[in-house]
Image (cartoon, helix red, strand yellow):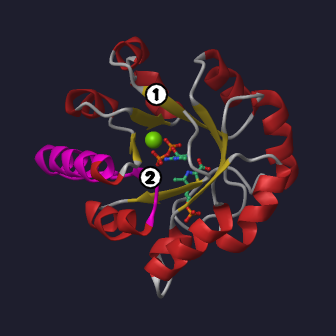
Amino acid sequence: MTLDRFYPIFDDVNWLTRMLPLGVRLVQLRIKDGPDAELRQAVEQALALCRSHGAVLVVNDHWQLAIEVGCDWVHLGQEDLDTADLPAIRRAGMRLGVSTHDHAELDRALSLVPDYVALGPVYPTILKQMRWDQQGLERVTKWKRLVGSIPLVAIGGMSVERAAGAFAAGADIVSAVTDITLHADPEARVRAWIEATR
Ligand SMILES: Cc1ncc(COP(=O)(O)OP(=O)(O)O)c(N)n1
Ligand SMILES: Cc1nc(C(=O)O)sc1CCOP(=O)(O)O
Ligand SMILES: [Mg+2]
């Protein structure tokens, strides 16, 4: 399966309702907290929306819920990996994306034979506090050499304007949050992303 090169991340299903009709084909639902029932409802709605638009849904963190709901993809960071039941994820037939920020994390990720590897933050991000400085485009190139044919996702401070540089450096996919969600016209921004990445 070839993943789309544009990979937006949203924290609410309403964003998916707005953006999927524009042609988004790969999207992550990243809800960091909230009541279990609301979370389940959000994942169920997101999956139904993505399937009706022919898009791939990646569920962040909540691997158990993703299995229960019948999702196809989950994204896990290094701390998530400490507690995730990877055999159960694989038995469920789910695909796995893994975050990496340094060589030790990349070695661990590669040992799991992930379906994509994410590297970040390529540029400074305002979404969350991180203990890593910006990785830079040279690091993207280094990562691509190390991951080989596994799709490489560039994340962190990415924008429409920065996407071409990340692709040229070796990223296969570019992921973004605030470049869209904080934009004055998020729909126009997503259209610009799609134009820049297809
Ligand atoms: C595509 C992508 N890359 C990285 C992350 C970050 O995952 P993680 O390190 O587990 O942090 P949280 O997003 O869970 O706060 C991601 N979600 N997606
Ligand atoms: C969720 C996330 N993970 C990162 C990592 O480096 O693992 S950077 C990041 C935030 C991305 O948001 P924005 O596009 O607004 O910078
Ligand atoms: Mg996580």
Position of residue 140 measured from the top left corner of the image (x, y, whole percent): 80, 46
Position of the C terminus, as image quadrant, is bottom right
Q: Is residue 28 left or right of residue 116?
A: left
Relative vertical location of residue 87 with respect to residue 24 in this rendering, above or below = above
* Residue appearing at x 84%, y 33% in the figure: 145
Position of the N terminus, as image quadrant, is top right
Position of residue 81 measured from the top left corner of the image (x, y, whole percent): 48, 26
Position of residue 52 measured from the top left corner of the image (x, y, whole percent): 28, 51
Distance from the alpha carbon under mark 2 to that under mark 1: 14 Å
Highlighted magenta segment, given as a residue range: 23-51
Secondary structure category for the residue under label 2? strand
Which residue is tagged 2? Answer: 27
Q: Decide whether residue 6 is among the magenta residues.
A: no
Q: Decide whether residue 43 is among the magenta residues.
A: yes
* Residue appearing at x 33%, y 71% in the figure: 18
Q: Which mark is residue 95?
A: 1
Relative vertical location of residue 5 with respect to residue 118 in this rendering, above or below = below
